[in-house]
Amino acid sequence: MDDLLIIGAGWAGLSAAAFALHLKPNAKIRVIAQGIGSLIVTPGWLSLLDSAQGDVIEAARDLAARSPEHPYALAGVEALTGAVHLFAQIGAEIGLGYQAEQPLHNKQVLTALGKHQTAAVLPYGYQGATQAGVQPLFVGFEGWRDYYPALSGAHFTLVAPPISERPWDLTPTDYARYFDQPHFRAEVARLVKARLNGATSVAFPAVLGLEHHAEVVQTLQDRLGVPVFELPTLPPSVPGTRLYNKLRRYLLDRRVRLQVGHPVVRGVREGKRVTGVEVAAAGKPQFFGAKAVILATGNLYGGGLFSDDHGRVWEGIFNLPVQHIPDRQAWFSAQMLAPEGHAVHYFGVRANAHLQPLDASGAPFAENLFVAGHILAHPTDAPSPFETSEGVALATAYRAVQMALMQP
Amino acid sequence: MQAGTSLSCDVLVIGGGATGAGVLFDLAQRGLRVILAEQNDVATGTSGRYHGLLHSGGRYAVRDPESARECIEENWIVRRIAPHTIEDTGGWFVAFPPDDPSYIPRWLEGCKAVGIPTEPVSVAQALKEEPHLNPRAYAVYRVPDAACDSFELIHTLIEAAAALGGKTLNYHRVCAIEKAGGKVIGALLENRRTGGYVRVHASAIVNAAGPWAGEIAKLAGANIHMTHDRGVMVAMNVRWVNTIINRLAPPGDGDILVPVGTVCVIGTTSVVVDRPDDVDIPAHEVTQMLDAGEVMIPNFRKARALRAWAGVRPLYDPPQKREGEAEGGVGEDGRFITRSFRALSHADVGAAGMLSIVGGKLTTYRQMAEKISDEVCAYLGVQAPCRTAETPLPKPTWFGGSGRKLHALTHRLHQLEHAPTHSNLICECEIVTRSQLEAAIRASGEGVSLDDLRRDLRLGMGPCQAGFCGYRAAGVLGETAHLPPARSIEALAAFIEERFRGNRPLLWGHQLRQALLDEMIYRRALGVPALQSEAHVAAD
Ligand SMILES: Cc1cc2nc3c(=O)[nH]c(=O)nc-3n(C[C@H](O)[C@H](O)[C@H](O)COP(=O)(O)OP(=O)(O)OC[C@H]3O[C@@H](n4cnc5c(N)ncnc54)[C@H](O)[C@@H]3O)c2cc1C
């Protein structure tokens, strides 16, 4: 019997496990997940409230006050601050950056199309983007299909770093592994240095190392003498994979049991309490008991919610009711990139201020079941859930862990 | 409007669907100088959005015998002259509960009357041949239906005509028809790629504009009453059957299942719409198709719905109906209007020499072409018999492997496996390599869109719906065509939205997840800006 069982290993699930270690170091914690959720496509930065102009936390507080059903209101802004600072502390320990200054302000980062995106907290790879200057040099790799520097900006170059394979079908992760090798990054630095030509900074696709990210960025910066930064790429996201790898090691080193690739098929409830979950295994499902369970399986993308052509939307483990629109015609706007986003982004499980999910009558489904991350519904008047993407994952994970660890 | 260029010919054919392409070839074969004008790419109107069935005529045997007869006559001919465009799947008419058994003898009689061969198949035998078929089926008859690739057919006709001097102008929209002395003398065409104008002097004009026939007639001052009947089809990623399955019941919604290549297509709905280009796909019509699929194939919707599209039937609906025509009148849907065709002259409005061919089916394209070409020749005083029923059509050149259109997955795999060196894959779902993409961009010239490249190469048509290849293709387009980055990014945004438009009605389950992944890539990781106007999206 575990003290805490977390279902899901995306932003919310992994953070919840790490937070639980800090809040109760001796707790027996288990994470069971089918996959790593949106980490595979995440840019890797923390969006807390992208539209915030001044102090981001204060803006989140206003949002919570205006919108009492918003996950920030349910979790409380104290949970958001607690989560961000704890995440920053862990981020430093695992060597990925994520410093959170106080007060916290939004920053502008660049994409592979030369467009600006906003985020509040950045891993090392994006920090240089805030000092890109007037003439960043965009560097791509000759013959590689996943990054086209000509689309990023006026100053660009293609280099052919020393690799034995054909560069065509390499994944971003393959390049990241090359960058982990000191002679490779030294050679790339040498090639780029010759073409700097007055550049105020140098941008690469986000493949600057998997295991040794901080060193890679540091070496390139030292050799080139200007800020170096990354641009998010097509999946698999290297910043997301780094985060997963590092957090995984961190959790395993601290005796968290982590089982990824194991789909939970059913939750088991007796009376007002959840006793555990059943996990698909060879032969018959295996039961894992727990004193408290955090459901962090994500939204329709993450895999926590399911839908069909009749317009039904359901949650897959406890069969919790899902807030949604039954008319499927209304799920998506006419354009994929419509500025207003899509109604489906807001679908999710409703919860109370303890982050206990609610059943159809509006009562908690069970005393010891909590929800965290994007499985939570967003009120329809809330800003696009993309704007608060990692903030909601971290804040609700933090709050859910606090509540779950109070269980007898 | 100042015409930059002028061309002259005996006959101008308007519309690059099956009918127009058939007329182009027919008249070229009779020795006339012919030009075909198509406002978009060829085969993008109804003919590119149809269900894929070379009808036996069985569907119309009871209510519309004239059309049924035309279908079966042409069915035999098309099999003979264009076998490479056909997959001879054969077809069945199958009665499932709650289909009314009293329809069966009427149907058999109807088939017999117009010469459609039918052969009873025992249910046990049927289930052996098609194990996914609903075992509650209670009557099965074999008919000579087949699957027909309209892209192949139309390109075949256009190449065959070209060899005889028939010229095709893509992306040329007829915007005015010129008359003098009671007859037509030519037309003004807008080149939609360059914005320039071309004047075509012609002694006769054939209006083969399908559902747009009314609009074209108006340009000549004539009035044709067309009913625009929209039908939705859904392609599933499983080829549930190897035989075309028709419901043995009066024509209704979602009662035909056509196997095509690796997929199968269920269709269609039938909704009268205002405009010939209203190809919207309401979500409920998709669900209706899946429900209908379940009747024929239990668990039908467990397969993944890959793609939905809609076409608008060009039904000719004259106010004065001939006897037997449109029995039961026009209802809510256009199903009671005859599928037969008519040739119309517009001499009465001072547009002698302008002839419209309206109604019909893709299956009967050749007969329609023959009929209107006969009328054209009579008008021009040309004595030349139609020979299209006896002339086998040559396969288009791309079949030899040297060609430019490469849209068969098996062909693609063959090429890749036998290539001396592999090349890098831009679209992994449909196996499109960088060199193919570059070649297509160079061949297409200025202004090519990613959607044009999609039609040539099937780029972005697999399960990921351009989630990955869209960005790559925009990058390659920019490099190859030397576009400024803003243009490449705009091309990418337009492509994303075009793909999304076809995908949106199918967003549930896995496909919905895939769309959300694509959105995260484009909106978040890449920051693709929203398209400025709907107009970009609508113009395909
Ligand atoms: C849903 C559906 C399913 C069908 N299924 C079948 C089937 O299974 N079997 C079958 O035999 N038939 C089927 N049909 C019928 C068949 O598709 C049509 O009858 C046939 O394709 C019509 O061909 P067309 O060449 O006359 O028209 P189209 O293919 O529509 O061609 C007309 C062309 O004219 C062009 N045009 C319009 N205005 C202008 C202008 N101003 N200047 C230049 N060009 C212009 C258009 O762009 C278009 O390409 C189906 C139809 C629908 C809608």
Image (cartoon, grey):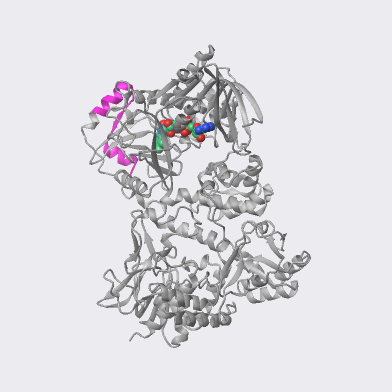
Q: Which residues are magenta?
A: B106-131
Residue sitting at 63 percent across and 38 percent down? B194
The answer to whether residue A304 is above or below residue B183 is below
Is residue B85 at least partly visible in the picture?
no
* Lateral position of residue B263 relative to residue A230, left or right: left
Give the number of callouts: 0
Task: Name the outermost residue toward the left.
Answer: B102
In the image, A218 versus A36, the foreground residue is A218
Task: Left or right? Give the position of B236 relative to B381.
Answer: left
Q: Position of residue B113 (x, y in %)?
A: 29, 21
Q: Is residue B117 magenta?
A: yes
Q: Which percent across, then down, holds residue A21?
A: 46, 84
Q: Quadrant of residue A362?
A: bottom left
What is the quadrant of residue B147 in the picture? top left
Residue in front for this viewpoint, B225 or A323: B225
Q: Position of residue B36 (x, y in %)?
A: 56, 28
Magenta-colored stretch includes residue A217:
no
| Residue at screen point 21% across, 34% down | B101
Residue B402: horizontal and vertical position, in percent? 63, 36
Residue A224, located in which quarter of the rendered image? Answer: bottom right
Q: The C terminus of chain A appears in which quarter of the rendering?
A: bottom left
Residue A148 sits above or below residue B362 on the image: below
The vertical placement of B40 against B33, above or below, is below
* Quadrant location, the N terminus of chain A: bottom left
Q: Is residue A272 visible?
A: yes
Q: Main secondary structure of the magenta part?
A: helix
